């Protein structure tokens, strides 16, 4: 006969579940590298820390889609900004030369 000791501050919650649901959740927990008890503890702790239920109710069927960015004008904007900064730099150097600092 094996006896296990529980820490003094622990309490047990018994939840009746359909057998298949328990099996699927156990398999899911194992895939996550843990066990059902730890997942339930994480859920409870997270809910209490955030003061809200910490799960989503929608099942994601596929990855979300990202709208493609229009990059057609990026090169033009880059060149324009580069030209502006080069002109500004030339003006600074011109003024420095004019004042004999360079």
Image (cartoon, grey):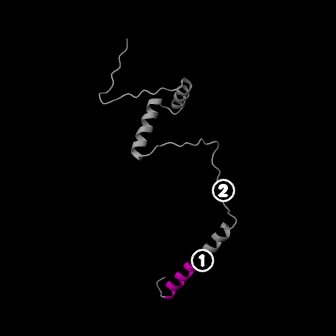
In the image, residue 2 sits, relative to residue 31, either above or below, namely: above
State the residue at coordinates (48%, 88%): 99
Q: Residue furthest top?
A: 1
Considering depth in this image, is 40 or 53 the residue closer to the camera? 53
Q: Residues within 10 Å of mark 1 (few under 14, many from 20)?
A: few
- Residue 55 visible (yes or no): yes
Residue 85 is left or right of residue 10, and the answer is right
| Mark 2 element type | loop
State the residue at coordinates (65%, 51%): 65
State the residue at coordinates (45%, 34%): 40
Pointer 1: what residue? 84
In the image, residue 94 sits, relative to residue 5, either above or below, namely: below
Overall secondary structure of the magenta stretch? Answer: helix
Q: Earlier in the sequence, mark 1 or mark 2?
A: 2
- Residue 35 visible (yes or no): no
In the image, residue 41 sits, relative to residue 23, either above or below, namely: below
Pointer 2: what residue? 67
Q: Residue furthest left?
A: 8
Q: Residues within 10 Å of mark 2 (few under 14, many from 20)?
A: few
In which quadrant will I find the N terminus? top left
Q: Which mark identifies residue 44?
A: none
- Where residue 14 appears, as percent x and y from the top left, is 42, 26
Give the distance between the C-alpha atoms of the residues marked 1 and 2, in whole angstroms: 31 Å
Residue 65 is left or right of residue 38, and the answer is right
State the residue at coordinates (67%, 70%): 76
Q: Nearer the viewer, mark 1 or mark 2?
A: 2
| Mark 1 element type | helix
Considering depth in this image, is 65 or 12 the residue closer to the camera? 12
Tell me the magenta residue range. Answer: 87-98
Q: Quadrant of residue 41?
A: top left
- Where residue 35 appears, as percent x and y from the top left, is 47, 29
């Amino acid at each position: 006969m094996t006896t296990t000791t529980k820490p003094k501050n622990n309490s047990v919650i018994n939840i009746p579940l359909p057998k298949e649901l328990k099996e699927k959740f156990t398999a899911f927990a194992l895939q996550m590298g843990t066990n059902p008890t730890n997942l339930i503890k994480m859920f409870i702790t997270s809910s209490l820390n955030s003061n809200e239920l910490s799960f989503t109710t929608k099942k994601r069927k596929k990855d979300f889609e990202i709208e493609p960015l229009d990059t057609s004008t990026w090169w033009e904007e880059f060149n324009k900004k580069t030209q502006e900064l080069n002109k500004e730099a030339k003006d600074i150097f011109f003024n420095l030369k004019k004042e004999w600092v360079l």
